[in-house]
């Protein structure tokens, strides 16, 4: 029976491969195609090959390689076979994200780069733009990255888009193209990426047959159907109802960060996860406090009238495979999903802490940053407990606040357009600290002090700011750094070392929470635009301090050695 099942898997995958035809990759050329960047000095290469631009040599080593592994000994034979299939489906998400991020064929593009280090850097960035340095072009013969990536026609202006009227104009699961008459239309993901999505759906259906947990099998089947139809809400509800399975997969078009033009359209990604039962048990108690914490938010009542779901759960996982958007540039260490506002209000969200990836970042990045930029007497306040909690409560805090504007502009996400993601990330960071303070006061958190969490958070700001201006998290951190500086929440001594003022930090957290929640509730696009432009910048002093981190050889982020061979599958 076991051999028969394995043969069946192979048949499904091979059949899908055989029937797969090339996806529509005829994305238009970048609007700035004429502005290709030519190097004044590049590595020696053939005339027709792209080469690394001068000045980027030091960027090639900003990632530290980490092996993604986990103990699979407690899993059944069926579950291990299912993991193998989930990785296969994830690889398709990776291919789909490449199509959304860059118009060139992945294999052809990478093969054109002769230098191995440069080729690897391009692979990590899913194209010729440095994602952790404001999407700067790092290869010759390359155009500036379009803010709309491959989601919109390259020659489309914002004015044209806003004046046009067509179906699914702001759709999460469609791209915008021109019809034969040059008018803007939307094309559903399931249509333009039909072959790849159909193949991924077939693999998820097959994986469901090996699931020991019925709820997880149901989720996989429904997620497969969602890939075929672009209707994801039912599978989101099924995912929320799935509580007991030791394996999880987050897969499909999910986050809209790649759409920096409007933030409307979702990018493909995947995580394959193994649940850490011991750590998850520790976290289970916190979700019950959400309704109470919502009522206590430091903002006028009308901005906290929504009631967050209280049956959301917190769990810790070891991640064993990243794909697509989650694997591009900076690596996610915690997940808060689903994004569907209706599901959030009815069911809350699930918060998944990716413990092994988090630990790798803490050891390789956070501790060296503290040694370089934090005053000696507060370095011991930078702890993994603080880092884990700050990251976890960031995700929990996405469930607090307001999801829909108070003045009829619809969801906050649509009203604030391309600024919605950065402001939401800033809200989650700030309200996460608010939650930690409240739970420490209640005695619900018993590990560490407020100074631990604040100092660890400060070191975390330096870590995330290095992700660059193109990242929603990076923008949020720059706004917060400048706001904290203005309010005296920290100080910098003559040696360039930072120290935290707990009292002033607390006051700054409350006032910034009020500001962000008010901007969201009012759908105040102009106000957010001004905030980002005025405060979302790196000043000269901070830039010099960040240069010290680079000079010390501290990695900016991690990159993974991952896959079936690593796992022994």
Image: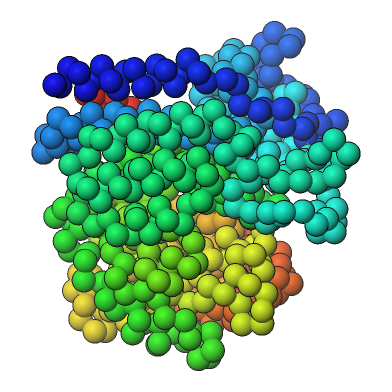
The residue lying furthest to the right in this view is 181
Tell me residue 172's x, y (percent). Answer: 59, 52
Can residue 287 be seen here?
Answer: yes
In the image, residue 438 sits, relative to residue 347, either above or below, namely below
User: Which is more toward the observer, 197 or 522?
Assistant: 197
Q: In the image, is residue 538 above or below residue 192?
A: below
Quadrant of the frame with the N terminus: top left
Left or right of 191 on screen, residue 506: left
Residue drawn at (61%, 77%), measured in percent from left and top? 405
Image coordinates of residue 78 in percent, x first then y, are 18, 32
- In the rendered structure, the answer to whether residue 192 lies left or right of residue 400 reads right
Quarter in which the C terminus is drawn: top left
Residue 147 % position (x, y):
71, 46
Residue in the image at 53% along x and 66% along y = 424
496 relative to 207, above or below: below
Question: Would residue 205 be found to the left or right of residue 507 on screen?
Answer: left
Give the residue displayed 40% in from the left and 87% down from the top. 295
- Identify the residue shown where x is 43% and y is 67%: 344
Q: In terms of depth relative to the viewer, which is nearer, 108 or 170?
A: 170
Which residue in the rendered view is the most extreme toward the bottom? 301
Q: Quadrant of residue 384?
A: bottom left
- Image: 15 above or below 218: above
Q: Nearer the viewer, residue 495 or 454?
A: 454
Q: Is residue 433 visible?
A: no
Give the camera-side residue of 191 and 38: 191
Does residue 367 appear left or right of residue 460 in this picture? Answer: left
């Amino acid at each position: 029976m076991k051999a028969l099942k394995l043969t069946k898997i192979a048949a499904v995958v091979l059949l899908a491969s055989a029937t797969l035809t090339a996806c529509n990759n005829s994305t238009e050329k970048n609007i700035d195609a004429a502005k290709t960047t030519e190097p004044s000095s590049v590595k020696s290469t053939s005339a027709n090959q792209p080469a690394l631009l001068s000045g980027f040599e030091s960027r090639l080593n900003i990632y530290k390689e980490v092996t993604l592994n986990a103990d699979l000994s407690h899993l059944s034979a069926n579950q291990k076979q299912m993991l193998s299939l989930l990785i296969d489906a994830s690889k398709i998400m990776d291919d789909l994200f490449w199509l959304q991020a860059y118009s060139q064929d992945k294999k052809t593009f990478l093969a054109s780069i002769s230098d191995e280090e440069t080729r690897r850097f391009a692979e990590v960035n899913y194209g010729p733009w440095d994602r952790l340095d404001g999407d700067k072009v790092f290869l010759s013969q390359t155009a500036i990255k379009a803010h709309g990536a491959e989601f919109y026609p390259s020659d489309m202006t914002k004015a044209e888009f806003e004046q046009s009227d067509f179906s699914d104009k702001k759709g999460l699961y469609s791209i915008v193209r021109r019809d034969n008459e040059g008018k803007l239309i939307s094309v559903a993901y399931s249509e333009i990426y039909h072959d790849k999505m159909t193949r991924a759906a077939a693999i998820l259906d097959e994986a469901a047959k090996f699931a020991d947990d019925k709820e997880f099998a149901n989720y996989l089947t429904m997620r497969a159907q969602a890939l075929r139809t672009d209707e994801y809400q039912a599978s989101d509800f099924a995912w929320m109802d799935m509580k007991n399975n030791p394996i999880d997969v987050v897969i499909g078009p999910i986050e809209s960060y790649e759409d920096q033009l409007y933030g409307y359209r979702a990018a493909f990604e995947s995580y394959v996860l193994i649940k850490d039962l011991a750590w998850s048990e520790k976290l289970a108690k916190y979700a019950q406090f959400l309704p109470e914490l919502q009522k206590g938010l430091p903002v006028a009542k009308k901005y906290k009238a929504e009631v967050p779901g209280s049956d959301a759960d917190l769990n810790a996982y070891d991640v064993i495979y990243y794909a697509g958007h989650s694997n591009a540039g900076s690596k996610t260490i915690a997940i808060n999903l689903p994004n569907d506002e209706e599901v959030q209000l009815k069911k809350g969200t699930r918060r998944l802490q990716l413990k092994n990836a988090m630990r790798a970042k803490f050891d390789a990045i956070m501790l060296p940053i503290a040694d370089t930029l934090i005053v000696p007497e507060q370095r011991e306040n930078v702890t993994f407990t603080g880092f884990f909690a700050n990251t976890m409560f960031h995700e929990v805090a996405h469930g607090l606040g307001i999801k829909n504007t108070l003045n009829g502009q619809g969801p906050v996400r649509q009203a604030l357009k391309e600024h919605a993601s950065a402001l939401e990330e800033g809200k989650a960071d700030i309200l996460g600290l608010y939650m930690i303070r409240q739970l420490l006061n209640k005695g619900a958190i018993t590990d560490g002090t407020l100074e631990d969490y604040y100092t660890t958070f400060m070191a975390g700001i330096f870590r995330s700011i290095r992700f660059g201006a193109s990242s929603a998290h990076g923008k949020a951190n720059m706004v917060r750094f400048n706001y904290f500086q203005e309010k005296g929440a920290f100080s910098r001594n003559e040696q360039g070392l930072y120290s935290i003022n707990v009292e002033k930090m607390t006051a700054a957290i409350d006032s910034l929470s009020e500001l962000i929640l008010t901007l969201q509730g009012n759908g105040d696009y102009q106000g957010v635009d001004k905030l980002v432009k005025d405060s979302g910048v790196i000043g000269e002093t901070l830039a010099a301090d960040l240069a010290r981190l680079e000079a010390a050889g501290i990695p900016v982020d991690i990159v993974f050695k991952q896959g079936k061979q690593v796992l022994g599958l």
